[in-house]
Each structure stands twice: as C-alpha cells, then as structure tokens.
Image (cartoon, rainbow, N blue to C red):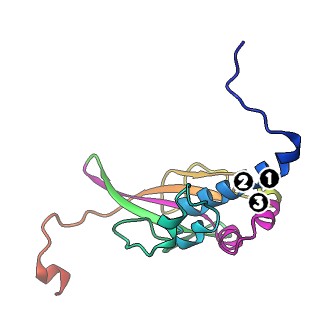
Amino acid sequence: MEYDAFAVPTKHLAWFGQILARTAAGAQLAFAGAGREVAQYLTAKQGRRHYEQRTFAGSSSVHDASHRFGSTTFVGTDHVFRLGGVRVEAFSEMAEELYDLLADGEVEQYRRRTYALRNDWPSETTAPCWGPASFREDGTVMALRVLPEFPTRVTADALKL
C-alpha cells in the first residue's frame, strides 16, 4: 500500500499546527467576505498583498451583510446570480462572535469558542425566509434564497437618476 504523505519532525509539530490554524483562520474570514482582515494570516507567497489592498465590491467579496438565524447573528457576504433564469442570493457567513475573534487575530480564543459552541448551531437544512441552508460545526453557514424578479430592462426613470 502506498501513501501520499510527508513527515513533520516532532520539533516542528507546534509550528506546523500554528501554520494550519492560521491558514484555516484566513480561509474562514475569506468565506465570510473579509478583506484586509485575511492578510494577517497569510504569507507573501499565500497572497497577503492581494488582501492588504483596498478592493471594490465588483472585484472581490465584501463583508457587508448580516442575518439572524435563531438567536445568533451571522455576518458575511452575499452574491446574487441567476440559476436557470431565477434570481438567487447566496449568503456565506459565520457567527459574528467568531468573526470578530478572527478579525482581531485571536485564533486560539476562536478555536476554543468554536469548540464550545459546536453543538449549538442550528441543524436544520432550511432557514426561515431563506431556503436551503447548511450550518456547520465551525460556526459557518451557507444559505440560499430566491429573490423577486427584477425588470430585465432598467431605465433611468426606474433608477431615479
């Protein structure tokens, strides 16, 4: 039997664990639409410079949305797209409390708090006023909902320009 693996020397295990935790923290923030907060967790080779720069909403995800599911406020980003001609909103987010810990660089506190809360997240597969939703033990959620139809031809009068 062949394994694709590599050995981490015992003396480097703590360092390697920190690298994995920081990379995961950056990924969690990116999922929730964070920008500059992600940079603190990345090396130059991982693309720190991309996240240190200001971006515009049209060119990157933006952490600018929040929704409440049950007793928890989740924050993140949303994207609107068409699925078979139907307008759909996708919301990728994480619990606000956990987001704030990562944004402040508190990875260990985030890990402890996530572990403590892992059984408290909703377990439903749909969310009120939304539709399909996937709640995970790490405090993240992806939710979808159908949006009302938008006129296909937009005029200056419609936009009140």
- Name the kind of residue labelled 2 in the image: Ile
The answer to the question of whether label 2 and label 1 lie on touching residues, with beta carbons closer than 8 A, is yes
- Name the kind of residue labelled 3 in the image: Thr
Image spot of residue 53 (x, y percent): 46, 73
Q: Quadrant of residue 111?
A: bottom right
Of discs 1 and 3, which sits in the foreground? 1
Looking at the rendered structure, which numbered label has been put on residue 114?
Answer: 3
Mark 2 residue element = helix
Residue, far top:
1
Query: Residue 96 magenta-drawn?
Result: yes
Looking at the rendered structure, which numbered label has been put on residue 19?
Answer: 2
Say which of 34 and 55 sits in front: 55
Say which of 134 and 39 sits in front: 39
The vertical placement of 113 against 137, above or below, is below
Q: Which residue lies at the image location 66% right of the left edge and 59% below the top edge?
A: 25
Find the magenta span and give its range.
Answer: 85-112
Question: Crowding at label 1, few (<14), some or many (≥20) Cα neighbours within 10 Å?
Answer: few
Q: Earlier in the sequence, mark 1 or mark 3?
A: 1
Rounded to the nearest angstrom, the CA distance separating label 3 from label 2 is: 18 Å
Question: Crowding at label 2, few (<14), some or many (≥20) Cα neighbours within 10 Å?
Answer: some
Mark 1 lies on residue? 15
Query: Residue 132 magenta-drawn?
Result: no
